[in-house]
Amino acid sequence: MRIGFMLRNLGEQGGIQVYTTNLLGELLALDSPHEFVLLYRDPAFLGAYAGRPRVEEVVVRCPTKLLWDQVAVPWAARRLGLDVIVNPKLSVPLLTGRPTVFTLHGAEQFAVPEVFGRIDRFYTSLMMPVYCRRAGGIISTTHMGVDEIVRYVGADRRKLHPVHEAAHPRFQRLDPAACQEVKARYRLPDRFILFVGGINPLKNFSNLLRAFKDLAGELPHALVAVGFLRWKYARDVALIDELGLGDRVFRTGFVPDEDLPAIYNLAEVLALPSLYEGFGIPILEAMASGCPVVTSRTGCSPEVAGGAAILVDPREVGDIAAGLRQVLVDRELRWSLIERGLVRAAEFSWQRAARESLAVYERVAA
């Protein structure tokens, strides 16, 4: 079987890029008879997987994303003799005449539409039901995600397949001395609460700042925000100074994956009180690194946390502050969360995700 993998999103930042690169790496490492045809829009990625057996890399040129998805890829699929087309990001070609599979990473645009722009909301509400009807298979990254996609999008449950993500093996407990170079390079404080994610209203960074303000007078910790600015971020960034937290909040910007394990090891707690997470890979990255987690009881975070994190109401500032206070003050609770988190993170693997995803591709192609 020749599996075409749409890789227009390579080079982007964020969780879907992490998903794509980790999943693809493990798919190509599996002992399977299938051939993978990697479809790039950007020729700069040619050779990224050179030397892998059963891999063909092809540049499909097209001026716009929509035309690339809906015209260029179907044309390339016919020319290349693909048996199934896979898109790890949110859409499928509609007129390809071949079976298609895509990953729908969450239903946040339906669950909390108010945090997205008008054009995004219109496009998603119009096209996502169409993609779900035309796809032969839809991968959701959680079981709850399956229920949400059926509820909000009206997708056929028989097409939906839950496949969990994971933390990369690089996320593990490290010797404190090994973390000092990263600490010095990013000028990190001695004690800090960690936030990881692109800053946008969905991540609820404003309420995290308000909760941190409540704690700032009683605890010595700083707040370190690792991630880039995504959309509607101006209010979040301005709030740092409005709350008088300019000397207690450190923004690193985007951090390469190779440096993240040390930062998780240095942090005293990960705070991820998002309004909605389709999975929340930082939850598992933190747990695997021995960093306790405070996250939301909404969205898919509780399924991923599996009882190994403190769950809070993301819309209640006092609840976020109370959850963080518990972890930072109660040493017995902290060590319990660390131990449970290490066990929970070990229950997920990208190799299993690759095997389960490949089984979906095979089923749809058949």
Image: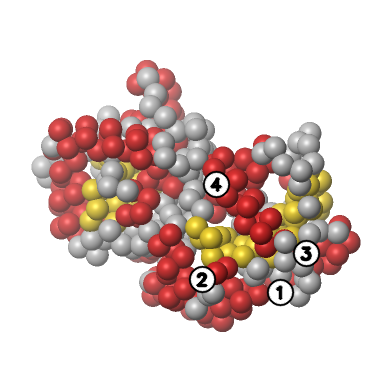
Mark 3 or mark 4: name the one nearer the start of the chain: 3
Which one is in front, 73 or 13?
A: 73
Count numbered badges in the picture.
4
Could you tell me residue 311's position as x and y percent?
Answer: 24, 53
| Rendered residue at 36%/40% (across/down) | 344
Residue type marked 4: Ala
Q: Quadrant of the C terminus?
A: bottom right
339 sits left or right of 323 in the view: right
Per the image, the residue denoted by label 1 is 94
Per the image, the residue denoted by label 2 is 157
Please give the label number shown on residue 353: 4
Cα gap from disc 3 to disc 2, whole angstroms: 27 Å
Per the image, the residue denoted by label 3 is 73
Local crowd at mark 3 within 10 Å, few (<14), some, or many (≥20)? Answer: many
| Rendered residue at 20%/46% (across/down) | 324
Circles 4 and 2: CB distance less than 8 Å? no
Could you tell me residue 76's position as x and y percent?
Answer: 83, 62
Local crowd at mark 2 within 10 Å, few (<14), some, or many (≥20)? Answer: some
| Rendered residue at 36%/62% (across/down) | 299
Local crowd at mark 4 within 10 Å, few (<14), some, or many (≥20)? Answer: many
Q: Secondary structure at mark 1?
A: loop
Above or below residue 47? Residue 301 is below
